[in-house]
Amino acid sequence: MKTPPHKTRVCLLFGGKSGEHEVSLQSAKSIYEALDKDKYDVLLVGIDKSGKWLLGDASKYLLNATNPKLIALNKTNASVVTPVSSDGNTSLMRLEDKGQVGSIDVFFPITHGTYGEDGSLQGFLELFDVAYVGAGVLGSAVGMDKDVMKRLLRDAGIPVARYMALKKFEMSVKRLHDIAHDFGFPVFVKPANLGSSVGISKAHDENELQQAIKTAFQYDTKILIEEYVPGREIELSVLGDDGPIVSVPGEVLPQHEFYSYEAKYIDEKGAVLQIPAQLPQEIVFRLQNTAKQAFLALECSGMARVDFFVKEGGEIILNEINTLPGFTKISMYPKLWEVSGIAYSELLDRLIQLAQDRKRQKDILKRDFTI
Ligand SMILES: Nc1ncnc2c1ncn2[C@@H]1O[C@H](COP(=O)(O)OP(=O)(O)O)[C@@H](O)[C@H]1O
Ligand SMILES: [Mg+2]
């Protein structure tokens, strides 16, 4: 009898401790549904808000799965698991009875935000010597810290908005006046390490600036004061490793004063996505080249969404990179690929392949290298 070909065992990791827990559940649902079950055995591990890893059953791992406002992890009867590895094999172990669940070829973290996208989870997975999708520890960490990210981008000659980074101890009334004088109004204030526009304000006068600084310091010990950039918000998707490819650009048209948390997640009509963005070809080329350069300068791998401002005269300013962008079927990252000719399921295949290739590259490091 012929033995069936070995399916790749993928462990989808989602949820997590960040404010983007629910978005992650939606991304995971889309990914699980689209993964080709003839190619992959999929383990579903939801990380709850306290950080527990719960192995779920495909038929009931989510509650209110179709309602973005009420979607939640189903914790009933889910086993708590932890990864374990021995002799080069990584598997999951149930804590209740120490039983092991299969062996895992690739982890697919789709955990947006703090702990999931900032290198913490990536570092944890590194310890198990296993392939995982997306950026590694360094790329994830620098992609999350808007200050370090901009310094590396500037070093690569990529234009970013003028900004200053501030720690709490550096604040004073005099400092506040100086910032107001230096940056003028409006001005943006943001926590250094966060996403989803949480803690971000657009201040229009010195009173609002003071309040904005207070707000941002509730979320991080380091904040950014950033010049206001008037321009269109254009995003591109990057896929690959050393020779990444870049999608067509898409445009976000926020219906609020800026692309705030409300515009992103609360108000259903908060933003309109225009794919592809209507831009002169010359600007598209410049955006694509810069997105690729940024991906490499920031040590990314697998995927990233690169977000720009395009000013009226055509000047481009790189706003930020997201190493684990939203991944529902209607999210910008996969949508841009779909319009660029890579369908959602194929995109997943490519990301999994890239993760396995990267692991293989690392495994052969110790062998002889000939130029
Ligand atoms: N310097 C700026 N000038 C104009 N708008 C900005 C600026 N910085 C941020 N914004 C607005 O705030 C939104 C969120 O800021 P961003 O830096 O992308 O943070 P996040 O990582 O939370 O998405 C942007 O999409 C944009 O609408
Ligand atoms: Mg953003």
Image (cartoon, rainbow, N blue to C red):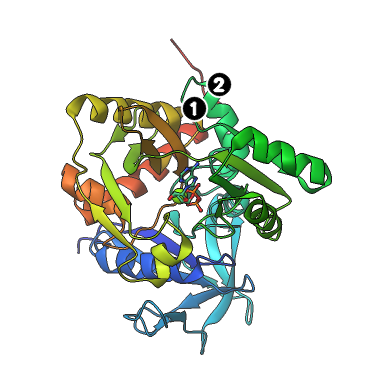
Between 186 and 49, the residue placed more toward the observer is 186
Q: Position of residue 298 (x, y in %)?
A: 51, 32
Residue lying furthest bottom? 76
Q: Compared to 340, does 18 lie above or below?
A: below
Report whether 312 appears left or right of 200. Answer: left
Q: Which of the two marks, 1 or 2, is nearer to us in this view? A: 2
Does residue 349 appear anywhere in the picture? no
**Any atom of ligand 1 within 8 Å of the CB at mark 2?**
no
Residue lying furthest top? 371
Q: Position of residue 232 (x, y in %)?
A: 33, 42
Residue for point 68% across, 53% down? 213
Would residue 345 be found to the left or right of residue 31 on screen? Answer: left
Q: With 106 as the anchor, is 90 left or right in this view?
A: right
Q: Check disc 1 and report its element: helix, strand or loop.
A: helix
Front-lying residue, 137 or 233: 233
Q: Residue at x 66, y 36 (%)?
A: 181
- Figure quadrant of residue 370: top left
- Local crowd size for mark 1, using a 10 Å CA cut-off: few (<14), some (14–19), many (≥20): some
Name the residue carrying label 2: 155
Which comes before the other along the chain, label 1 or label 2? 2
Give the CA distance from mark 1 to mark 2: 9 Å
Mark drawn on residue 297: 1
Depth check, front residue: 188 or 305? 188
Badge 1 vs badge 2, beta-carbon distance below 8 Å: yes
**Quadrant housing the C terminus:** top left
The amino acid at mark 1 is Ala
Amino acid at the residue labelled 2: Asp
